[in-house]
Image (spheres, rainbow, N blue to C red):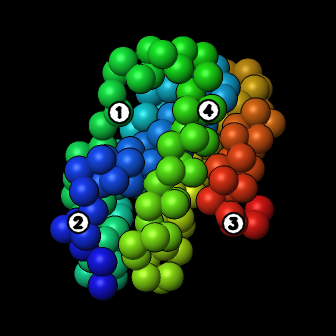
Amino acid sequence: MTTKADFNAEEWSTLVEGPLLAGMGVVTAERGGTLRESLAIGKTYTEARGHQGESPLLDAIVASPPAVDPSRMREAGQDVQALATSRLRDAVAVVEAKAEPAEVEAYKRFVVTVAEAVANAHREGGFAGIGGKPVSDREQAALDTIRSTLGLAG
């Protein structure tokens, strides 16, 4: 069983910001719905806290306030997805090096759950809330990139 104590501060920060950056990558994939999508991230974290005890590592991650360095976001500018991909690669390397396989899978599933919640939070296209689709092509591309980065099948 892996705990927060098994990681140094930099590694822990990388793990904690991974799910948030994945969500932000999807938020920035398409214009519109930013408020709903941001709220979906918080809701996903709240729901994950409700499953406490299933994975001590994941419990510690969702209990840590997710934050991203604002200067890093400014540097990324329009390319938040590239930043998310890079940091997710780092997070996966850290968790794979230190955690048990079941914990690695739980982490990856949580990252995808956050990203999918964002993608499904706001219908794209349509008019006045009618029509459109749940996930835009750009959001789907962002989700596909996240899954690929995590080594998960679509």
Closer to viewer: mark 2 or mark 3: 2
* Dot 2 or dot 1, earlier in sequence: 2
Observer able to see residue 153: yes
**Which amino acid, by three-letter code, is at mark 1?**
Val
Q: Amino acid at mark 2?
A: Lys
Secondary structure beneath dot 1 equals loop
Q: Position of residue 22 (x, y in %)?
A: 53, 44
How packed mark 3 is, by other alpha carbons closer than 10 Å (few <14, some 14-19, many 20 or more), is some
Q: Which residue in the protein does label 4 denote? A: 81
Please report the residue visible at 41 percent of the width from the left and 23 percent of the height from the top: 72
Cα–Cα span, label 2 and label 3: 24 Å
Marks 1 and 3 sit apart, C-alpha to C-alpha, by 24 Å
Image location (x, y in percent) of residue 134: 70, 43
Checking the image for residue 152, the label placed there is 3
Crowding near the residue tagged with mark 1, few <14, some 14–19, many ≥20 C-alpha atoms within 10 Å: some
User: For mark 1, what is the residue?
Assistant: 68
CB-based contact (under 8 Å), mark 4 and mark 3: no
Give me the C-alpha separation between circle 1 and circle 4: 14 Å
| Neighbour tally class for label 2: few under 14, some 14-19, many 20 plus, Cα within 10 Å | some
Q: Quadrant of residue 81?
A: top right
**x then y, percent, for residue 129:** 66, 28
In whole angstroms, how far apart are the C-alphas of marks 2 and 4? 27 Å
Q: Which mark is residue 14?
A: none
Measured in 3D between alpha carbons, the distance from the residue under mark 4 to the one under mark 3, in whole angstroms, is 17 Å
Q: Secondary structure at mark 4?
A: helix
Q: Can you say whether 119 is above or below 152 in the image?
A: above
Marks 2 and 1 close (CB-CB < 8 Å): no
User: The residue under label 3 is which amino acid type?
Assistant: Leu
Q: Which label's residue is closer to the chain start, 2 or 4?
A: 2
The image shows residue 107, relative to residue 31, as above or below, that is below
What number is the disc on residue 4? 2
